[in-house]
Amino acid sequence: MPTAHPSGWAHADGALRSTRPGGPHWLREPADPNALVAHLWSQTAAKEGGVLSVGGVPLPDLVREHGSPAYVLDEADFRDRARAFRDAFSDYAVFYAGKAFLCTTVARWLAEDGLSLDVCSGGELTVAERAGFPMERVGFHGNNKTLGELERAVELGVGRIIVDSFHEIERLAAVARELGRTVGVMVRVTAGVEAHTHEYIATAHEDQKFGFSIASGDALEAVRRVHAAPGLRLLGLHSHIGSQIFDTSGFEVAARRVLALHAQVSEEVGVEMPEMDLGGGFGIAYTTQDDPSDPSRLATEMSKIVEHECRALGIAEPALSIEPGRAIVGPAMCTVYEVGTVKEVALDGGLVRSYVSVDGGMSDNIRTALYDADYSATIASRGSDAEPTLARVVGKHCEAGDIVVKDEFLPGDVRPGDLVAVPGTGAYCRSMASNYNHALRPPVIGVRDGKTFTVLRRETVADLLATDVGVL
């Protein structure tokens, strides 16, 4: 993020990057600002006469029916991506990471298409239960699961619980004993590998809240305690190296360290763990600078890594699992907004930035402000013959950092009433949405074969005030 500057945030190092000719180094002025960059959008997205449609539904029609802003979920795209991971990783258990985006509709799709589900809170577990998701195909993550959450997970027969602390091992063992159940357990380990998209650096990544450190010996001790605890069935080790990963280099380093521990457990503890989870974090294309791998390539490369390491260690290959979330739902959803104002702002050096304000913002997509994330955008309601202009799409909230799209070329005649659509908003946008400034969270509208259906309805004022128990 831009560093502090005495003259304000807009003067900070990096804040004005989009005012340089051409914007940031990866952003190129398009020959046609109406055209879609196909690999940023769901598979059914298309433009005709400048009007964007998804799932056969023109977005102006969707907005007339459901209002704006709205998340638009392409069912065919979501399910095809889920099946692509299932089929490419056919020898793996594929756990969809529910934290990316979860609702009963999505859980039912996943159940029907044969995927497993990863949850990390009691709320997400409740959604799975409501959807009738097979509990033996559910994994429960989290660094601080409450006693109530553990009890409910065990009662429901969750297939595996990924433990994250010594306290949790004790707590879970007590729950299993009290309920008279045997619980499948994986131990989350920290492999000392930090993933930064295209970079993988083995550093002091131990300094974080998740997992047991391999280097310190805590991971081995956690395995010993799980193995020794009545009611806990040791399944294997779990590793997760980060998010928005575009190749398998980091997985190679992590797999080597985790499999070395796997072999050490066999030798020193005398138990052959049947499973290993390589985690998720597979990246998607938010802008033209991103080049994600397809599931088939990922499966081939990751399987080769595990096969090679197991052969070198002289051990049998464990049953493997992965946890894609963003890679399935991210490209399957876009967000559509209505433009309210357009403001040309004069900057230092004679530069000008066009601020396009929309009717949403950081309450429906916090990732730009929180992670300095990049997004793309297009005008969704009409075509334009105007020359492209470098713009910044911003929200309506009382924050200077309320930015949806930092840098994008839009037609120079963008005006109030236009619809702007942002691709790649399926992962974490609705999941992390808020009522900041008492905004109402947008609906998720599913589209397929020219029809719309409500996945999550728009919040109402009644919803907003339901928890406000103050006396009038």
Image (cartoon, rainbow, N blue to C red):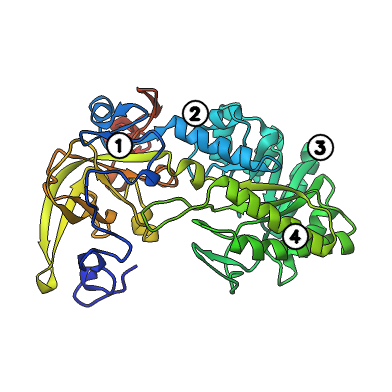
Left or right side of 45 for 188: right
Q: Amino acid at mark 4?
A: His
Task: Report x, y in % for residue 305.
Answer: 69, 58
Amino acid on which the number 2 mark rests in the picture: Thr
Q: CA distance from mark 4 to mark 3?
A: 40 Å
**Secondary structure beneath disc 1?**
loop
Q: Nearer the viewer, mark 4 or mark 2?
A: 4
SS state under label 2: helix
Disc 4 to disc 2, C-alpha distance: 39 Å
Give above or below for 186 relative to 334: below
Q: In the depicted view, which residue is nearer to us: 244 or 213?
A: 244
Residue at the spot x=13%, y=51% of the render?
387
Going from N to C along the chain, the mark reached first, 4 or 3, is 3
Residue 219 percent across, percent down from the top left: 73, 63
Above or below for 436 versus 128: below
Q: Nearer the viewer, mark 1 or mark 3?
A: 3
The span from disc 2 to disc 3 (Cα, nearest Å) is 33 Å
Q: Which quarter shows the C terminus?
A: top left
Mark 4 and mark 3 residues within 8 Å of each other at the beta carbon: no
**Does the CB distance between marks 2 and 3 fall below 8 Å?**
no
Q: Disc 3 residue type? A: Gly
Kindly identify which residue carries mark 3.
180
Nearer the observer: mark 2 or 3; the answer is 2
